[in-house]
Each structure stands twice: as C-alpha cells, then as structure tokens.
Image (cartoon, rainbow, N blue to C red):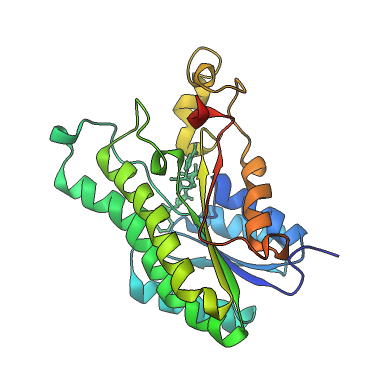
Amino acid sequence: MGKLDGKVAIITGAAQGMGKAHARRFISEGAKVAITDLNVEGGQKLADELGENALFIKHDVTSLADWARVLEEAESTLGTVTVLVNNAGIIGPVTPTVELAEEDYLKVVAVNQHSQYYGMKTVIPSMQKAGGGAIVNISSTAGMVSIVGAPNLAYVGSKFASRGMTKHVAVQYGPDNIRVNSVHPGYIKTPMMAAATDAEGGGISAQVPLRRMADPDEVSSLVLFLASEDSSYISGMEHVIDGGLTAS
Ligand SMILES: NC(=O)c1ccc[n+]([C@@H]2O[C@H](COP(=O)([O-])OP(=O)(O)OC[C@H]3O[C@@H](n4cnc5c(N)ncnc54)[C@H](O)[C@@H]3O)[C@@H](O)[C@H]2O)c1
C-alpha cells in the first residue's frame, strides 16, 4: 500500500530538480500527479517515463489564468486535487540590494511568492469540496534566516513570505481539514545549484555541519510525509531540511 494511494497532486516546477524527485516519489507511493512547468520538453519526458498516473501540463505559475486551466486539466484527467506542492522557484541575480533591478525583484517575487498565493487560491475550493487536503509550500533556509551570501533581497523576501502565507492559510482553512506547511531546504544538488555543486568540497559543503549537500530525494521524503496522512496533525509549521546549516 502506498502512502498516497488514491490522491491526486499538482507539483509545480517538476520538470527538473526537486520537483522531479517529488513527482517520482509521489507516483511510487500511489498518487496521480500533474507535473507542471514552463519547460515542456523536460516535463513531458518525465511524465512519459512515469506512466499513466503522470500528466504533464505546461504552466506559468505567475499567471492566475494559467492556474485555472491547470486545475481544470488535472481534474478532468486525474480527479479531484487534494495535494498541492508549490515548488517552482527561481533565484534571480546574485546582487546587493542597491544594484537589484526592479524588474528582477518583481520577477523573483512573482515566481516564488505570487505563485503560491495563486496556487492556494485556485486549489483550496477543490480541497474543501473533497473534505480536506494538504499543501506544501517550498520556501528555503533563506526564509528562516538571512544567510551570508544569500542571492538577493527578493529571494529572501519571497521565501519569508512563503512561510508567512503558509501560517495564515493554515489558520484560516484548518477548520476545513486543510493542512498547510512550509519546507525550508538548505543546499540541495539540483540544476538551480549546479554552480555550487561544482564547488562542493572546497565551498558550500564546508558550511554545513553534515559536510555535504543533499540529494533531491532526501527532500522528497519530507514532502511526502507532509503530503500524507503520516503528518495528519501537523499544520502551519516550517520544516527545515538543511544538514544542520541554520543551527550553526
Ligand atoms: N536547490 C536548492 O539548494 C534549494 C534550496 C532552498 C530552496 N530551494 C527551492 O526549491 C524549489 C525547487 O528548486 P530546485 O533547486 O529544484 O530548482 P530548479 O531550478 O532545478 O527547478 C525549478 C523548476 O521550476 C521551473 N519554473 C521556473 N519558473 C517557472 C514558472 N514561472 N512557471 C512554472 N515553472 C517554473 C523551472 O523550469 C524548473 O523546472 C525552488 O522553490 C527553490 O527556490 C532550492
């Protein structure tokens, strides 16, 4: 028996990196998954590989209209959506605040923060009708503390916002049996962190008490836990997965 048997999930930004690992794990635990991303080639390839319980839908998470279409397509093919993983995100330029261009600021906030508002706004009515659901908002350790070397103010601000919106929505929709949690990864080996991965050993890993970056699949274990009934009494909380980084 899988931990997500009978569940239908939307995972955004799932064509690569952590979203891809979450999609794989969810399918192996019995879920049907709408894999959404701007990257059509990567998303479709993954859906083909994962088989009939996976559906790729092209999706720009910064568009509310796109969200409505994605929900409609996911539900007409897979069934009522009761799990949402708001995973899509971008870093933006690595730059000090004074040099951060307004358009870059707005773009990072749109992809990382507005998307999570749109996603929750769109999917919560389905969860209410179904009698409950689980939302996992992917934030970052950059949404817990301001780490030296954080890429920019927009990334940190949007990841703190994700954590705050999570708590707000958890309080508001708890009576509908909808659980909402945020996940705060540290350094994870994904295409987003490719440059840092190249520097591993001499660079980033030295900051981490466990002295390594994580594989995306290690984060999938936490996301699966929060999406499944194993976490049935956990809501409105931040869950840090960082090898001890923010403890030091
Ligand atoms: N990798 C890390 O070390 C790390 C650490 C902390 C938090 N995070 C967060 O985890 C999440 C996943 O990161 P990752 O490392 O797997 O990144 P990634 O860059 O490998 O994958 C992100 C995916 O999001 C998609 N995407 C970007 N903009 C989009 C849009 N407008 N609409 C739809 N899809 C879009 C990309 O096409 C890509 O497939 C992000 O929210 C990121 O901020 C990553």
At a point 54% along the width and 83% down the height, the residue shown is: 128
Tally of numbered tags: 0
The picture quadrant where one finds residue 151 is: top left
At a point 66% along the width and 41% down the height, the residue shown is: 218
Whole-percent x and y of residue 26? 69, 59
Report the residue that reaches farthest toward the top.
202
At a point 53% along the width and 73% down the height, the residue shown is: 174
Report the residue that reaches farthest toward the right.
1
Left or right of 166? Residue 126 is: right
- Asked if residue 208 shows in the view, the reply is yes
Front residue of 84/145: it is 145
Front residue of 181/102: it is 181
Left or right of 98? Residue 55 is: right
Q: Is residue 219 above or below residue 130?
A: above
Whole-percent x and y of residue 164? 38, 56
At a point 21% along the width and 30% down the height, the residue shown is: 96
Whole-percent x and y of residue 107? 26, 52
Left or right of 146? Residue 227 is: right
Whole-percent x and y of residue 20? 60, 51
Front residue of 33/52: it is 33
